[in-house]
Image (spheres, grey):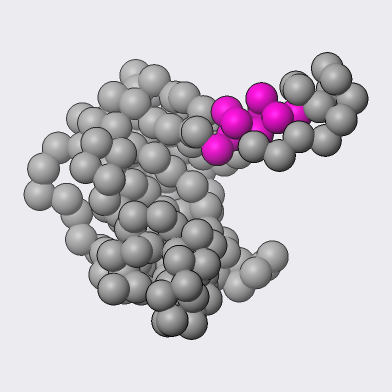
Amino acid sequence: MVRLIGHSVGGRPGERLLGRLGLTTSDDTIIRALKRGHQGQAPAYPVRVVGIDDWSQLKGTSYGTILIDLERRQVIDVLEDRNADAVGRWFKRHPGVETISRDRCGLYARGATLGAPKAQQVADRFHLLENLRKSIEVSIGIEVWL
């Protein structure tokens, strides 16, 4: 159940949802469950649209990378670290990737460019909303919560 909810909503939202269902667990536990379930398993189908983000193994000190097939809404791989070379190697092993949704992290931009130079890179939904929120705050001078 932890893995299914983690797939659906992610770490922190999954922690809140599971708490409401009476299953107390942390966002880190949810991410570890996702990682155990997918580490080293290459998808048996071509991946076209990939979401990439980091996750904290040890809050504030140690980070990994999670890759999601956005068309199927499935975690497809979890990398132990967060660096451009590892990301680039992953994309080279998956030449069918056409679109990469990522945050503003320069590491992922470089890795995607190294491994999938023809793929279109786009901002992920969270960062689009974050950019909108900041623009509204600057324009009207008040704090906005989206």
Residue at 75%, 22% in the rendered image: 135
Up-down relation of residue 55 to residue 116 (above or below): below
Q: Position of residue 113 (x, y in %)?
A: 45, 28
Instruction: Report whether 135 appears left or right of 42.
Output: right
Query: In the drawing, does residue 71 fall left or right of residue 102?
Result: left
Quadrant where the N terminus is found in the figure: bottom left
Q: Tell me where residue 136 appears, x and y as whole percent.
A: 76, 22
- Bounds of the magenta span? 126-134
Q: Residue furthest right?
A: 141
**Residue 131 shown in magenta:** yes
Q: Residue at x 50, y 59 (%)?
A: 13
Residue drawn at x 26%, y 70% is: 37
Residue 3, percent from left and from top: 31, 69
The image position of residue 107, as x and y in percent, is 57, 40
- Residue 57 seen in the current view: yes
Q: Quadrant of residue 139?
A: top right
Q: Is residue 139 left or right of residue 21?
A: right
Does residue 39 appear in this view? no
